[in-house]
């Protein structure tokens, strides 16, 4: 079946440094790629998304890039802050089975 | 606009019992999806309902079922509970995921099976 691989599973960065999380998807018909952030004990919330007709999208310190040829997309967080500590999930909307396929999540730890 | 409401927040059940969880979506949202999340695990898709019809289903046994009412509220039922069913159950509402509408998650129901 369709799947999304997400790496790394845990990422520890110094406060102020950048963090990059990468996802690879298998369904070439995927056309929508959201990223969700789940803080400890809270619900997942959408932080940014990108559609297949766009290569990059930015929102303040967060950016997402998409490489359709290689079938991978990445989340970039610059100038990391303590409140960025959370689990981040990527997902790809599969046009084959009309379903969001989720990555396994990345635990981002911001060291003071 | 009120967010997605899930009830109850916490539930403790015994093996073999059954349980019903409830989800009220954001007003105007016709799609409700259910997910299971276990400690350290990702989001495991259970099923999606749209306009009272199950539109998609994940790889869970038949003990897991759901339904959606005409007001878009949804319920999830788990019968013959097993210890492994202990998890956080999240529901998410959307205008329509097939149109790339974002999911809005509730705070979840934490189910403990003893």
Image (cartoon, coloured by chain):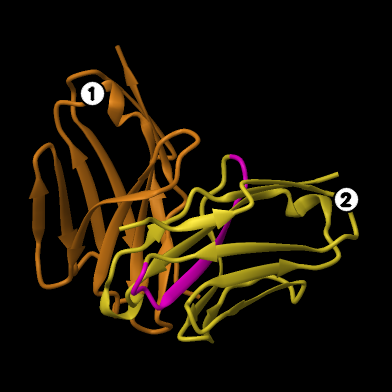
Task: Establish if B112 lies above or below A18.
Answer: below
In the rendered image of this protein, which colour is used for chain A? orange
Residue numbers of the magenta segment: B27-39
Q: Which residue is mark 1?
A: A81
Q: Are marks 2 and 1 on the same chain?
A: no
Q: Picture coordinates of residue A52 (x, y %)?
A: 17, 71
Q: CA distance from mark 2 to mark 1?
A: 42 Å
Q: In this view of the protein, which residue sits in the foreground, B23 or A11? A: B23
Query: Which of the 4 image quadrants contains residue B98?
Result: bottom left
Q: Picture coordinates of residue B28 (x, y %)?
A: 34, 74
Q: Which residue is mark 2?
A: B14
Q: What is the secondary structure assignment of the residue under circle 2? A: loop
Query: Which of the 4 image quadrants contains residue B80?
Result: bottom right
Residue neighbourhood size for the residue with mark 1, other residues' Cα within 10 Å, grouped as few (<14), some (14–19), many (≥20): some
Chain holding disc 2: B
The residue sitting at 75% across, 77% down in the picture is B62
In the rendered image of this protein, which colour is used for chain B? yellow
Q: Picture coordinates of residue A56 (x, y %)?
A: 9, 56
Q: What is the secondary structure assignment of the residue under circle 1? A: loop
Q: Is residue B1 left or right of residue B59?
A: left
Q: Picture coordinates of residue A66 (x, y %)?
A: 17, 60
Task: Establish if B80 lies above or below A97.
Answer: above
């Amino acid at each position: 079946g369709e799947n999304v691989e997400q790496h790394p599973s845990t990422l520890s960065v110094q406060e102020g440094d950048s963090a990059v999380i990468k996802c690879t998807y298998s369904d070439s018909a995927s056309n929508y790629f959201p990223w969700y952030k789940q803080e400890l004990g809270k619900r997942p919330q959408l932080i940014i998304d990108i559609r297949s007709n766009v290569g990059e999208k930015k929102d303040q310190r967060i950016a997402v890039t998409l490489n359709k040829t290689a079938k991978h997309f990445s989340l970039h967080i610059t100038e990391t802050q303590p409140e960025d500590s959370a689990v981040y999930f990527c997902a790809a909307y599969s046009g084959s089975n009309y379903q969001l396929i989720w990555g396994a999540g990345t635990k981002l730890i911001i060291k003071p | 606009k009120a967010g997605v409401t899930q009830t109850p927040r916490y539930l403790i059940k015994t093996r073999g019992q059954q349980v019903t969880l409830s989800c009220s979506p954001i007003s105007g949202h016709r799609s409700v999806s259910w997910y299971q999340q276990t400690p350290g695990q990702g989001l495991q898709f259970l099923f999606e309902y749209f306009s009272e019809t199950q539109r998609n289903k994940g790889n869970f046994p038949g003990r897991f079922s759901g339904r959606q009412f005409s007001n878009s509220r949804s319920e999830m039922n788990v019968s013959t509970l097993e210890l492994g069913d202990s998890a956080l159950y999240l529901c998410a509402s959307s205008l329509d995921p097939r149109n790339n509408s974002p999911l809005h998650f509730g705070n979840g129901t934490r189910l403990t099976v003893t």
